Image (cartoon, helix red, strand yellow):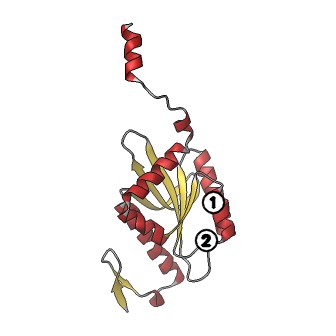
Amino acid sequence: MTGLDWKGMIMTTEGDLTTTEKGQNFEKEVAAIYEALGYKVERNVQVKGHQVDLLVTRSLAGARTITYMIDAKNRSSGSVGINDFASFSTTATRLFLDGAITGAIMVTNADFSQIASGQALDSNNLRLMTINELRNEIFNPSEALTRTIIDYEAREINAEYIALDAESNLAHVIG
């Protein structure tokens, strides 16, 4: 049986697909959402020796380019647990410390275990999202902007920012 997905692509029903095909379709959907949010998307890339489902980049006006590693986890049943999170976290941390990414996001069509969710809360650079939360960002740009600001404010460069006060600088030059 075939149907149309949210982007109008012809697809077979989930029952007709292998687990690998379901995972690939889920990854394609996640990629399409990031493209809709204005990111440049690369699928199945090697980054510093690590296989990454998606590498998404976007330039922010007045700021640097942000690059996120995206791990797409499709589940037929159950939740994404601590083992999946630990592998994701290890890879993301290495790539972050190497300067290859500015953050990492794991997206799933299921739920996250309490332990995995708790571990993610302890990190400024890692985020867990359901596909529905990601879809909602398309329709709520203020939330996406707020998240970008929060991510930027958590970065070391933000602590080094020096506010420029034009009036006091001008007085110093003139005076």
Q: Which residue is mark 1?
A: 120
Q: Nearer the viewer, residue 30 or 94?
A: 30
Asked where in the image residue 154 lies, by quadrant, the reply is top right
Query: Looking at the image, is 126 positioned above or below residue 1?
Result: above
Give SS at disc 2: loop
Query: Looking at the image, is 58 positioned above or below residue 21?
Result: above
Give SS at disc 1: helix
Q: Amino acid at mark 1?
A: Ala
Residue reaching furthest to the bottom: 1
Residues packed near mark 1 inside 10 Å, few (<14), some (14 to 19) or many (20 plus): some
Task: Give coordinates of residue 109: x percent, y percent.
Answer: 51, 75
Q: Amino acid at mark 2?
A: Phe
State the quadrant of the C terminus.
top left
Q: Determine the residue positioned at 45% across, 90% down.
A: 16
Q: Is residue 70 left or right of residue 166?
A: right
Task: Give coordinates of residue 170: x percent, y percent.
Answer: 37, 15
Q: Which residue is mark 2?
A: 112
Query: Looking at the image, is 89 positioned above or below residue 153?
Result: below
- Which badge, 1 or 2, comes first in the chain's sequence? 2
Callout 1 touching callout 2 (CB < 8 Å): yes
Task: Give coordinates of residue 2: x percent, y percent.
Answer: 35, 89
Task: Give coordinates of residue 139: x percent, y percent.
Answer: 36, 65
- Alpha-carbon span between mark 1 and mark 2: 10 Å
Residue reaching furthest to the left: 8
